[in-house]
Image: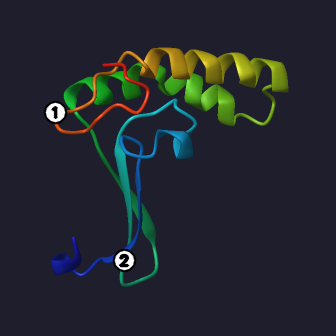
Amino acid sequence: MEAAGYTFVKEGNAWTEPARFGGGYRGINMTFRTKDGLEFEVQLHTPESHAMKVETHPLYEEIRDPRTGKARKAELEDEQRRRWGTVPYPAGIPNPAGGP
């Protein structure tokens, strides 16, 4: 990406830092900036984590909706954690919770 003229801004790795992502996501997110200052994110997934991202995206959108109440958000976040907890970690990346 940098060779193509984009500036690296930040990275988040939910495989190695699951608590940083609330336990409800597995993937690597990288943010880059164009020469014009526009920032964009690239998400890196395993086939299983991509499928779960697609499956849980409606939950994510409901969590982000300002009309969603606190109790409902907590339910949705619990459900996200439950579902994401079934996604296996890639070989060589230890699961801090001891699961798949």
Q: Residue at x 29, y 35 (%)?
A: 94
Q: Amino acid at mark 1?
A: Ala
Where the C terminus falls, by quadrant?
top left
Tell me if 69 is positioned left or right of 92 in this view: right
Q: Which residue matches tag 1?
A: 91
Q: Amino acid at mark 2?
A: Thr
Mark 2 Cα-neighbour bin, 10 Å: few <14, some 14–19, many ≥20: some
Residue 76 lies, in percent from the top left, at 65, 19
Image quadrant where residue 31 sits = bottom left
Q: Name the element at disc 2.
A: loop
Between 91 and 30, the residue placed more toward the observer is 91
Q: Please report whichever mark, 2 or 1, sits nearer to the chain's N-terminal start.
A: 2
Visible in this render: residue 69? Answer: no
Residue 44 lies, in percent from the top left, at 27, 46
Q: Residue at x 58, y 36 (%)?
A: 22
Reply above or below: 89 against 11: above
Q: Residue at x 73, y 22 (%)?
A: 74
Between 4 and 21, the residue placed more toward the observer is 21
